[in-house]
Amino acid sequence: MRIVIEQNRCIGCGACVESCPYSAILIEAEKASINEYCQLCRACLSVCPEGAIIEKSEESDNIEVVDLSAYKGVWVFAEQRDGHVASVAFELLGEGRKLAKELNTELSAVLFGSTEAEAKELIRWGADRVYHCRDRIFDSFNDEPYSQQLIKLITRFKPSIVLSGATPIGRSFIPRVAARLRTGLTADCTALQIDKDSGNLLQIRPAFGGNIMATILCPNRRPQMSTVRPRVMKRCDYEPDRQGEIIEIAAEGLSSNTEVLETHKEASYCKVNLQEAEVIVSGGRGLGNPKGFEMLQELASLLDGSVGASRAAVDEGWIKYSHQVGQTGKTVCPKIYIACGISGAVQHLVGMSSSDIIIAINKNPEAPIFNVANFGIEGDVYEVVPLLIKKIRESK
Amino acid sequence: MRLIVCIKQVPDTAEVRINPETNTLIREGVPSIINPYDMHALEAAIAIKERKGGKVTVLTMGPPQAETALREAISIGADDGVLLTDRAFAGSDTWATSFALYKAALKIGFDIIICGKQAIDGDTAQVGPEMAEFLNIPHISYVKAIEDISESSITVQRMMDDGYDVVRSKLPVLLTVVKELNTPRLPSLKGKMAAKKAVINKMTKESIEAEEDNLGLKGSPTMVKNIFAPEAKKDRKMLTGSIEQQVDQLLEELRRLKCV
Ligand SMILES: Cc1cc2nc3c(=O)[nH]c(=O)nc-3n(C[C@H](O)[C@H](O)[C@H](O)COP(=O)(O)OP(=O)(O)OC[C@H]3O[C@@H](n4cnc5c(N)ncnc54)[C@H](O)[C@@H]3O)c2cc1C
């Protein structure tokens, strides 16, 4: 495929030049042209008032098609730490159920390491079947044995869709699996749908630091693989009596060039545990000093929540990095996010904008945080927050 | 130590915005920069070279203009640069990108390859691990500290959700690094001179001996179907009245949400 500009229709207005994130469009002699900077991202297609920018497919465009009908079923890779299945796995089972229903197929989970009790939990959370490889080699996470084993399983059982958490574990080893299987992998998805006509998986994800969303397809290869952002998908109902099949799989012929020597749980990480918190009270530069965080801690405790921070506050040294939310910190998605004195730079927004309810308190009515807030209070945090604390206390 | 640092030239995404009416990107002269994570990868490689000796090669796949990114890396301390550029690479997804980089890395030769955690435009974090798989070598992602390096192994700290792991790997290895690893240095005057004079080694699909079926659009299993603006909150509401009244309304909402 090429993106081309039909020269006879181009009026040289330059709208496309502005739209290109890669500076690949130039105006020469009053006509636009696209140079080799073009990454085929399609950003320009809809801006042209004359409809002069078109996609031109070429014979050599498409990757060779595999026999799609040979692949069936939806799989969820259920990651574990210290034997405990991560909560993202249960979320993926919830989403996987929906997809499996739409495709009229089965939902399976894959569990490496851990216990039979945990495998049963996966069934109660929606899996029809669990492929369980209970070898000690999976106790700690090493990319090579994890990917070797998953490659074997996929090659043998041929699922059509494979989902995994977009966590440090999933984002690290799943790419190896996709590379080896010569199939596509969509990173950090925030929504999944089935295309009614083709049955393909529509994988929706943020890119450009969350400034845009993209729909990604893997039409000609199988399985269709995605890593999915934690705390975005909803669990389905827990059914304590749900029955399913557990298939024990032996781990053979695996090897690892890496070895985990120690694991450190960072005390602050456990205490903060931002990604699990239902309420987060976050502070930014608007707090003006580290004392402000004591006030936020008080509010957070009253709401059973945790304290977060913008990068600005962390850079000032007012609070530890482990509290940082945003592009270079954590992605969170609590029920309630209260942003206090945070302006809402896009790098911060990408880390918290999928929270259920966002409350913003800021002196500046123009602050971009108000654009994503469900409730905004224009005011001084040192006036608003103490009053809120007082009133919550009184009401208890 | 032969070190390769993979760098990508990216638009500074902090400045990319989308026009919600037309669903299109507004670029307005967004500058091209070296992907910020790759600056940390470069710093790590230079630091290893300073301790262990050897050579740092920066490798990028991109349009001819990406040469400026290589020269910038040389001004900071890389020894030489390889520009992988060919029309056949256009439209590569992470599969095809890492395939081409893998072929180039084989030609260059290495003990350690260092990548950034992710590129700030595509944001996938997949190119490093995919490259390692093609090369049949181990990789460690999210490296936040390097504890020890010997001729045959490296020990690093790998960031995890709940803390970090200390991981040892045999060499050769590929690492992807996070910002906590180090503080990138600035270009030196001597470096700037070297960058001006440096001869950039250009590689094409022929020189890396890659089959066309594995490159560019044709080699890419994924395709971008469309792009659109992130959804804005529909029910946004500025509270009004005195601060006290606003706090009361907020409290009411918190009660409704069963949070108080
Ligand atoms: C909106 C959008 C969404 C996309 N989503 C996906 C997707 O989900 N899956 C997919 O497979 N492709 C996707 N792509 C394509 C993907 O962005 C390109 O293949 C891109 O060139 C490489 O991926 P990345 O930017 O995500 O790099 P990452 O994998 O995030 O980069 C990690 C590291 O790899 C190295 N590296 C990456 N690219 C290069 C390079 N060209 N030269 C040298 N080193 C490099 C750098 O060290 C970098 O820090 C998408 C593209 C767009 C425009």
Image (tube, rainbow, N blue to C red):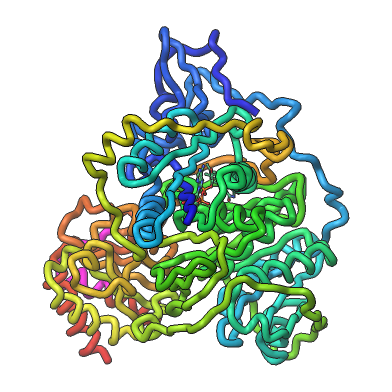
Q: Is residue A91 visible?
A: no
The quadrant of the image that shows the C terminus of chain B is: bottom left
Q: Nearer the viewer, residue B10 or B98?
A: B98
- Left or right placement of residue B177 versus residue A191 in this view: left
Q: Nearer the viewer, residue B93 or A348?
A: B93
Q: Is residue A279 above or below residue B72?
A: below
Image quadrant assignment for residue A103: bottom right
- Left or right placement of residue A302 versus residue A200 in this view: left
Residue A345 image position (x, y, % from top left): 29, 54
Q: Is residue B25 visible?
A: yes
At horizontal 56% and vertical 82% (from top left) the residue drawn is A81
At horizontal 63% and vertical 30% (from top left) the residue drawn is B88
Residue A121 image position (x, y, % from top left): 68, 86
Residue B245 part of the magenta segment: yes
Q: Nearer the viewer, residue A195 or B50?
A: B50
Q: Is residue B24 above or below residue A332?
A: above
- Left or right placement of residue A190 versus residue A137 in this view: left
| Magenta range | B238-250
At horizontal 41% and vertical 47% (from top left) the residue drawn is A211
Q: Is residue A70 above or below residue A335?
A: above
Q: Is residue A73 above or below residue B25?
A: below
